[in-house]
Image (cartoon, helix red, strand yellow):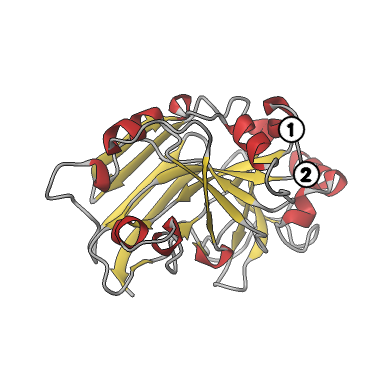
Amino acid sequence: MKLLRVGTPGQERPALLDADGTLRDLTGLVADIDGTLLADAEALGRIRAAADAGALPVLAGAAPRIGPPLARIGKIVCIGLNYHDHARETGAEPPAEPVIFFKAPDTVVGPDDTVLIPRGSAKTDWEVELAVVIGRTARYLESAEAGLAHVAGYAVAHDVSEREFQIERGGTWDKGKNCETFNPLGPWLVTADEVPDPQALSLRLWVNGELKQDGTTAEQIFPVGEVVRYVSQFMTLYPGDVVNTGTPAGVAMGRPEPKPYLRPGDVVELEVTGLGRQRQVLARA
């Protein structure tokens, strides 16, 4: 299933995109798309049965804004330097263990919402990523297979980053990762049953129509199941938590000088196989 949330910011309502590309209203079945729903197999089963029976009403009216596909996100765990080609382009050694940092849930915006370049920024960068959404409480998992079994679904994430803030200003990476609007998510949350192999997905990103990133999750140093297993050794993952699993080669930071960092008015488009497409216009904060 492709689950999403539509409407003005803060007023989104749950919906489903059916096989014909029609938006269907879920408000009669569920209150929202969140961790509570993802942990409830019976509720998800009712949605699936109603969709299969053609019993869900069409979402009436003009094409609505698409918001983030997940409400009330608990935490966003991010994995850095998780692609062999991205490590090579930045001159970094592949890490022996996953590199973990965090994004605050309030960085999340809709897939087509405006992304704001922070005040004082000269090095705002793009990063297309596969986002993993947790559906079962995960703690001290013993295998990568168990990690995958705790995944409710997948989405496109844009891990926007300010490289000067992240690398040159001291401390941890968090200053360059948590600026407002720095995590567009969606358009859909695609349930795990529709993604049989998360290590066989293409990721692409364009800036002003020019292809910048063209990678595959097969290049991940730590595959999705292993990432979830590993993270569960250090913190408990709950339904509705999100894990951003890293970006492939092609970011501005990895390019020759002068590096083509983002500027107001730039248009970024990104997609992951089967998970939909995003489009953002950059503006000043």
- Against 253, residue 280 (above or below) is below
Mark 1 lies on a secondary structure that is helix
Q: Is residue 140 left or right of residue 195?
A: right
Residue 131: quadrant of the picture: top right
In the figure, residue 206 lies in which quadrant? Answer: top left
Q: Residues within 10 Å of mark 1 (few under 14, many from 20)?
A: some
User: Residue 8's spot in the image, x, y percent?
Assistant: 55, 72
Would you name the residue on which mark 1 appears? Answer: 149
Give the residue displayed 63% in from the left and 26% down from the top.
196
Question: Quadrant of the rendered structure where residue 27 is?
Answer: bottom right
Looking at the rendered structure, the kind of residue marked 2 is: Arg
In front: 229, or 32? 229
- The kind of secondary structure element at disc 2 is loop
Q: Amino acid at mark 1?
A: Ala
Q: Position of residue 198 (x, y in %)?
A: 57, 29
Please state the horizontal and vertical placement of residue 130, each as a whole percent of the image. 51, 41
Tag 2–tag 1 contact (CB < 8 Å): yes
Question: Which labelled disc corresponds to residue 136?
Answer: 2
- Which comes sooner in the sequence, label 2 or label 1? 2
Residue sitting at 41 percent across and 40 percent down?
Answer: 247
Left or right side of 208 for 176? right
Quadrant including the C terminus? bottom left
Q: Please state which of residues 147 and 39 is positioned toward the viewer in this rendering.
A: 147
- Would you say 17 lies left or right of 98 here? right
In the displayed structure, 227 sits above or below 234; it is: above
In which quadrant of the rendered image does the N terminus lie? top right
| Residue at x-position 61% and y-position 59% | 5
Total numbered labels: 2
Q: Is residue 111 above or below residue 179?
A: above
Q: Position of residue 245 (x, y in %)?
A: 52, 41
Disc 2 packing (10 Å; few <14; some 14–19; many ≥20): many
Q: Which mark is on residue 106?
A: none
